[in-house]
Image: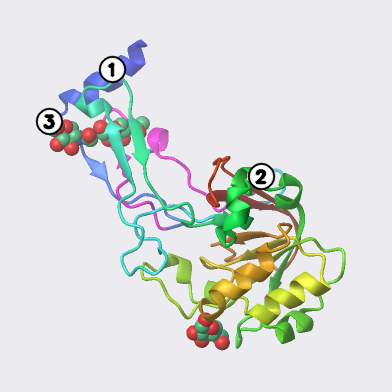
Amino acid sequence: MALTQFLLFFTLFSLPSLPISTADSDAYPSIPGTASINGDFITADELKPIRREVYNEEGKIYDISHRLTPEMPSWDSTEGIGRFLWLAASIKNGSLANNSEMKIPTHTGTHVDSPGHFYDEYLDAGFDVDSLDLQVLNGPALLVDVPRDSNITAEVMKSLHIPRGIRRVLFRTLNTDRRLMFKKAFDTSYVGFMKDGAQWLVDNTDIKLVGLDYLSVAAYDDLGPSHLVFLKGRETILVEGLKLDDVKVGLYTVHCLPLRLVGAEGSPIRCILIE
Ligand SMILES: *[C@@H]1O[C@H](CO)[C@@H](O)[C@H](O)[C@H]1NC(C)=O
Ligand SMILES: *[C@@H]1O[C@H](CO)[C@@H](O)[C@H](O)[C@H]1NC(C)=O
Ligand SMILES: *[C@@H]1O[C@H](CO)[C@@H](O)[C@H](O)[C@H]1NC(C)=O
């Protein structure tokens, strides 16, 4: 152990009561349960992580993934995802290092669906998230606003006039205005694709990456039918639970990277937009 580390270790243990600040990021709701250490020996500046939504130094990067927190919505639940992360080994309890463990459904927060999600034979055949095409998940992408008074039907898709050749589209909907991804209780009235909207997209566009701003790209009422239409051809990749707040409509480069979970039909995903 280096001397500074030892001193930090010693300091943490010898303070009778460690002042913990609960006010974390000024810009954004912080992750509940985390805190900055604000003691005499460690200044907030030294130990306070910078949490950002937008990186602005050399070209703009928007983080369009949601933070994973216990309060974030979980499918069909009023309770959020709940406690999913714990310190299995901790320095405070005598371990050399802190080691956390987690347990979450693979379709939690910002995540991706593989063809195996709604087709059993595809999952059996190995069409898991590890088989998803990184060429589809990365490249030029269009962010569009859809009309706020409807789910995404064929009519709505037609009205968007998305040109042929566009392969990746992120659909911002009423879900973003309603801040549904920031609400703990799952809301079945979210906006998504109706079956005819999904079919229209598959038949009349070159879109292979479909992104949406709630936990499913398919409207609750057409959950099965819309997924079946999208995933049948095994070419369309569905990215769900995107954070599209405060990003201007337009053309970006998207980068989405799922975990290489062999055998899983879903995975949490990190997505960014580069301007
Ligand atoms: C290590 O774990 C302790 C709890 O034992 C926690 O207070 C501390 O913030 C953790 N340190 C890091 C670097 O995560
Ligand atoms: C440390 O160990 C005690 C006793 O086993 C336990 O109650 C506590 O939750 C542990 N703390 C952490 C941070 O693991
Ligand atoms: C979208 O469909 C859901 C049911 O899946 C419904 O509750 C909601 O009101 C619809 N939203 C709009 C804007 O029509």
- Does dot 2 land on a helix, a strand or a loop? helix
| Residue at x 77%, y 64% (from the top left corner) | 207
Q: Which mark is residue 131?
A: 2
Q: Which residue is mark 3?
A: 16
For label 2, count other residues whose C-alpha is less than 10 Å away and answer few (under 14), some (14-19) or many (20+).
some
Q: Which residue is mark 1?
A: 7
Report how far apart the C-alphas of labels 2 and 3 lie in the structure: 53 Å
Report how far apart the C-alphas of labels 2 and 1 lie in the structure: 47 Å
Instruction: Locate residue 260 relative to residue 162 in the image: left or right.
Output: left
Residue 226 on image: x %, y %: 62, 73
Mark 3 CB near ligand 1 (8 Å cut): no
| Residue at x 22%, y 28% (from the top left corner) | 92
Residue 46 on image: x %, y %: 41, 33
Please tell me in which quadrant of the rendered image residue 196 appears: bottom right
The residue sitting at the left extreme is 16
For label 1, count other residues whose C-alpha is less than 10 Å away and answer few (under 14), some (14-19) or many (20+).
few
Considering depth in this image, is 221 or 187 the residue closer to the camera? 221
> In the rendered structure, which amino acid carries the disc numbered 3?
Pro
> In the rendered structure, which amino acid carries the disc numbered 1?
Leu
Mark 2 CB near ligand 3 (8 Å cut): no
- Does dot 1 land on a helix, a strand or a loop? helix
> In the rendered structure, which amino acid carries the disc numbered 2?
Ser
Residue 24 on image: x %, y %: 36, 49
Kindly check if marks 3 and 1 are in contact, taking CB atoms under 8 A apart as contact: no
Q: Earlier in the sequence, mark 2 or mark 1?
A: 1
Instruction: Locate residue 213 relative to residue 233 in the image: left or right.
Output: left
Magenta residues, start to end: 29-56
